[in-house]
Amino acid sequence: MRLTPKVKEILSWYEAENPGVKTNLARLLMHGRLAGSGKLVILPVDQGFEHGPARSFAPNPAAYDPNYLFELAIEAGLSAYAAPLGPLEFGAARYAGEVPLILKLNSANSLAGGNVNDQALTATVDDALRLGCVGVGFTIYPGSDACYAMQEELKEIIREAKAKGLVPVVWSYPRGGKVSKDGETALDIVAYAAHMAALMGATIIKVKPPKAMIDLDAAKSAYEKANVPMETLPDRIRHVMQAAFNGKRLVVFSGGEAKGTEGVLNEIRQIAEGGGHGSIIGRNSFQRSKEDALALLDQVVKIYLGQA
Amino acid sequence: MRLTPKVKEILSWYEAENPGVKTNLARLLMHGRLAGSGKLVILPVDQGFEHGPARSFAPNPAAYDPNYLFELAIEAGLSAYAAPLGPLEFGAARYAGEVPLILKLNSANSLAGGNVNDQALTATVDDALRLGCVGVGFTIYPGSDACYAMQEELKEIIREAKAKGLVPVVWSYPRGGKVSKDGETALDIVAYAAHMAALMGATIIKVKPPKAMIDLDAAKSAYEKANVPMETLPDRIRHVMQAAFNGKRLVVFSGGEAKGTEGVLNEIRQIAEGGGHGSIIGRNSFQRSKEDALALLDQVVKIYLGQA
Amino acid sequence: MRLTPKVKEILSWYEAENPGVKTNLARLLMHGRLAGSGKLVILPVDQGFEHGPARSFAPNPAAYDPNYLFELAIEAGLSAYAAPLGPLEFGAARYAGEVPLILKLNSANSLAGGNVNDQALTATVDDALRLGCVGVGFTIYPGSDACYAMQEELKEIIREAKAKGLVPVVWSYPRGGKVSKDGETALDIVAYAAHMAALMGATIIKVKPPKAMIDLDAAKSAYEKANVPMETLPDRIRHVMQAAFNGKRLVVFSGGEAKGTEGVLNEIRQIAEGGGHGSIIGRNSFQRSKEDALALLDQVVKIYLGQA
Amino acid sequence: MRLTPKVKEILSWYEAENPGVKTNLARLLMHGRLAGSGKLVILPVDQGFEHGPARSFAPNPAAYDPNYLFELAIEAGLSAYAAPLGPLEFGAARYAGEVPLILKLNSANSLAGGNVNDQALTATVDDALRLGCVGVGFTIYPGSDACYAMQEELKEIIREAKAKGLVPVVWSYPRGGKVSKDGETALDIVAYAAHMAALMGATIIKVKPPKAMIDLDAAKSAYEKANVPMETLPDRIRHVMQAAFNGKRLVVFSGGEAKGTEGVLNEIRQIAEGGGHGSIIGRNSFQRSKEDALALLDQVVKIYLGQA
Amino acid sequence: MRLTPKVKEILSWYEAENPGVKTNLARLLMHGRLAGSGKLVILPVDQGFEHGPARSFAPNPAAYDPNYLFELAIEAGLSAYAAPLGPLEFGAARYAGEVPLILKLNSANSLAGGNVNDQALTATVDDALRLGCVGVGFTIYPGSDACYAMQEELKEIIREAKAKGLVPVVWSYPRGGKVSKDGETALDIVAYAAHMAALMGATIIKVKPPKAMIDLDAAKSAYEKANVPMETLPDRIRHVMQAAFNGKRLVVFSGGEAKGTEGVLNEIRQIAEGGGHGSIIGRNSFQRSKEDALALLDQVVKIYLGQA
């Protein structure tokens, strides 16, 4: 399939990347129902690490089986499926070529003591190659005591992934340090998070939808003086996109906790309106029955296609 | 010997592995009295590190001699013998080819200060190759202060072991952090432990039999809402198996402290009933006289063969 | 273009360097409006990391776009543009050959807890080669708890950069340890900072303009006995140059916080009078409108050309 | 010289080792007056690190000269001489081939703060090859805060030494953690120390003579139930040998502080009676005049030859 | 020039070294006015790191220029010039072959917090090769919290330097741990420092002149029992030499703080009388005018030549 003008434009933002990275980025942007639109909807399933199996899959026990998650992503026509090593190894051969894969390289868990804002590297870039992935995912916690160490790990991951033609996707989730608990999704913090990921060379950036709040004292006067609009979610998304090289880095937004269908769709409509490049939807999809999940994802895809 | 359909089915769960890993997994599943059954009974002897020599071997001084332990595993027709470097080096040449070996790569000791939830790496994957082993064993303590570091070590061990055709066996023993002392064998904790090992790519998972208790507050509502059955041990084993890729990862259960014959057998009957893939029995075998140990292991094997 | 006698003299101070380093140093000294003068004016933009996007770019939103910063440096005829990985990757191909680039290899951020005087390495020397840079930038915080670790990182960066023909530029910013907050720009501290960078093999040294104060008790008598002149800024610049191998290392001075045009120019006149080799001007240029920034930079260049 | 049946039996305990290790072990067991007896008496001189030069050598200043120590070991017909890098480098060429050498790879010193239970690696396995040694020595402190790190260093040393055909000798000295000061030489602790060294793959184990005391509460009932004899030193030596693979690992005992001739000989008679494989005697030999030291060592050798 | 018998004797103490190390040691011993005498006078200039530029060079501003220091060492006919990377790079090409160079590989600074007894590695052994040096210098702080880590760094430096034919020179300066502030130059401490450097394989050892005091309680009785003479400086120097393999390691003594000419010369006379191999004189030479420094160094050289 020939690239669409939209996808060609996006590739032009990544002029310094080698053809390998561009090829995998094109594969991602040309797959599924959103192929060619410049938008992305991704199924991420790393909650097993983060929250344990029952909190993740007991609401929909079919999802305990790794095959289920591949099939959900494929049947919904999503752009990609992102997961840790074990589940990808489980299905990568069986579903080879049916959906672009992103190997999540690091993970936290909720048994660890609460003041440890760090993650463990649980897979390698070479694992992603071996499993046929188009990219790798990595989380940083800007602000945490481990933030500089995590950034240095990310530096290495990005360098190695790109050298091997893979797309690095960065989950940028500030916490700790000067960031208040409530401020983790403040507008300044989310914009800073997106900006730092862009500065480090992330190809795709994942952040949370920001709320109308400025958390860092040092940033308040800058927002006031410049009169940055922040009342509506589309306003705030626009500011985050601005912080992502003036909109020239791909930014996708997570959905957060499971919630009602209308709540999910309403938020996504505003993300799309503000210029976000897509959504990454975990619990809100795999914790529903397959039928309900497919119906919801159908609506999400339609929003990004401008059909809903 | 041709693989049985049961063993072929198990190998199909590990589709992404290279032929080297599959070969050694097949060797393990096709050895001893349980050959072909899809079940495993393993003799592990790392208590010398964990508890010291007298607490381990004074009840049956014949076991001070490493030859004794090889012979016990061989005469009982077990699936494998797992031990640290020194004892395996002692007998690996003499008993070459008579029983599959698993080299335990890390160990704790009880001289170390009590608040250190970590282990020392005391052997390498290459040692396992040199000694003719089919696999390597590694313990993680999810929840401990060292848990992310241990996971990163495990990531490397798994990567190297599989690249060299060896089967990684993960002892997943939560402790510390948000896990209460009593909760180390709570159902949610054991299921989480099994799930994390699966997420990291373990081929065989070793956990403790879970009890009817939920330890993490954050997990309680999930168990309640989903009404996960947990009254009987078979119920709980079933849930742990679910957490292990819906039963598609090999999970074996440890026996814990030495106890009476009937207590051991009763527990194992329930593990088998719940769908566990086998048992790993240390102190309950080598601390009995050889005659008693062989009699007990005979019963255990029969349970897994459905003959008792 | 043939090297000017001034540039040849500067190259003679770096006799031990290989032709690769000398070539890139010559490129820097022979570029832009200051070509051949032995003076340097550099545009540095790493405030996105240090202060976040809005505090950096909201005063002049055009600067959110990485292209803008390349064009500012080019249109102003500056000696070089220095930035982190992401923005350089954005424009390095588009503007290839139009302005010498310096890749800033490490960065701090203001989400991190306040008592962490360290930075994260966020790019590599090989990235600089890949992007066509003439040099790399690295910050050390002499005095901080991390100072010895940062110096050891710098040692490696300098070694690798020079071996690959790149010019190392060292941001030497004392803080912590025996340095008082107010004393970070004291004369003895800034001279010590410049001297340490020279001792470590920096080719170009960046420090802050010093003020008339001696911070270390142990240094006071040395300054008094030797009667080191320090009343005027040119006096103090002269002392800093003395500490930089008696003026035979290139030293450029940062501009600090945004301030009025006359304040900026007045300071730069005194730096030039004291024998400083140039200025590195960030917020005072990119936070103004492009028109105002170009006007200001024109004046700065003229000062160093002796035309204002 | 052909190996004696006793030495052949000992080599049979090390069946998994390569011919290089077996060759150097045979050299050690076939050297000096004890050649062929299966017993070892070794001169260790690392007190210069541990206690400083004057506390070590002022009682017999001739020993300041490294040549003296080589000559003492040679003239006494000992099995080996063990020392740190500097002294071995001093005489290794001059005395090449006259006495088997063991390079001590790590050392503590008594200037370091008292709560640091660790040692510094001060030489490498390759140094031992370069100097013609038959083995390397390494100390671990089981129980100390550094114990897991020291074990991991030891794992590497053992692996590398054996790969290069050298015999690893492990000084296993518990301290810190759950070990009381007085309990460092308790029977359970010394047996545990010997056992751990054997588990890690030590070829020769060095421990202190144990006293009639059980230090770990958790071990007391095991010793009581099994009624382990511990009244006499030969009893206790027998138990330590049991913990060393039922006597099938070479275990030598240190002499401790300088004491009277009869005290030394009496202790060694009991070690020999209990089945210990030999002694490693430092201060009790080199702090006496050469004449006295040779007389004492003559008696020690005779005890192990069964002639005294 | 043929080696003198004295130099040949010294080389015989280093029998295990390769010809590369022996060649550079011979170059050092056969250079300058002391050539062939077996004595060494070295100019060390690392005070820029340790005390900053003004405290080092303001008393004699000509010394700000790195050329000055090369010329001082050359004109005074000294054995070697030792300095950090930057100053050696400055003049190594210009003065190639005119004076043996020693690259100081690590350095502390006085901005760092006072309780940090460590240094930063600021250059590599390969830098020394690249610059034509005969040796490398490295400081350890026995007793400090970092002492084992510093010793492990030194182990690597010595190994690499010797493998590459360079002479390792060890600055052994105890501090921290069990060493009192006043005791840093106590006789037992300095002798221990010299001994440890020798044990680690140092070719040349640099210590401070010891004073008549025993610092470690544990050492006092050893000194009393052996009645070690310590009243005069020559007595103490003799004891330090004894601790340096009975005088068979090269030991040079530092001069300490700047002081009057007669004070310096008097101390050096006693060092020579006690059998010290030479002096390493920094502030007492470069902080004087060149004329005064040359006059002083002429006297120092004459003392070691037995002419004053």
Image (cartoon, coloured by chain):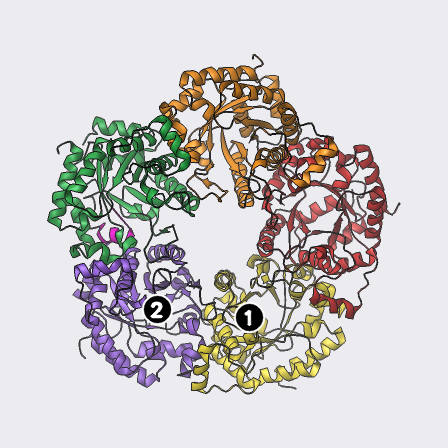
Chain colours: A orange, B green, C red, D purple, E yellow
* Percent coordinates x, y for residue D307 in the rendering: 18, 78
For the record, the magenta segment spans: B82-96
Assign the C terminus of chain B to one quadrant of the image: top left
SS at badge 2: strand
**Amino acid type for the residue under numbered disc 1:** Tyr
Please check whether the numbered discs 2 and 1 fall on a single chain. no
Residue depicted at x 65% and y 51%: C18
Mark 2 Cα-neighbour bin, 10 Å: few <14, some 14–19, many ≥20 = many
The residue indicated by pointer 2 is: D101
Q: How far apart are marks 2 and 1 (CA)?
A: 30 Å
* Percent coordinates x, y for residue D4 in the rendering: 18, 66
* Percent coordinates x, y for residue E223 in the rendering: 46, 83
Residue depicted at x 15% and y 41%: B262
- Residue toward you, D282 or B262: B262
Res. B76 in view? no
- Residue toward you, A299 or B250: A299
The residue indicated by pointer 1 is: E173
Res. A300 in view? yes
Q: Is residue B131 magenta?
A: no
Q: Mark 2 lies on which chain?
A: D
Q: Mark 1 lies on which chain?
A: E
- Residue toward you, D274 or B18: D274
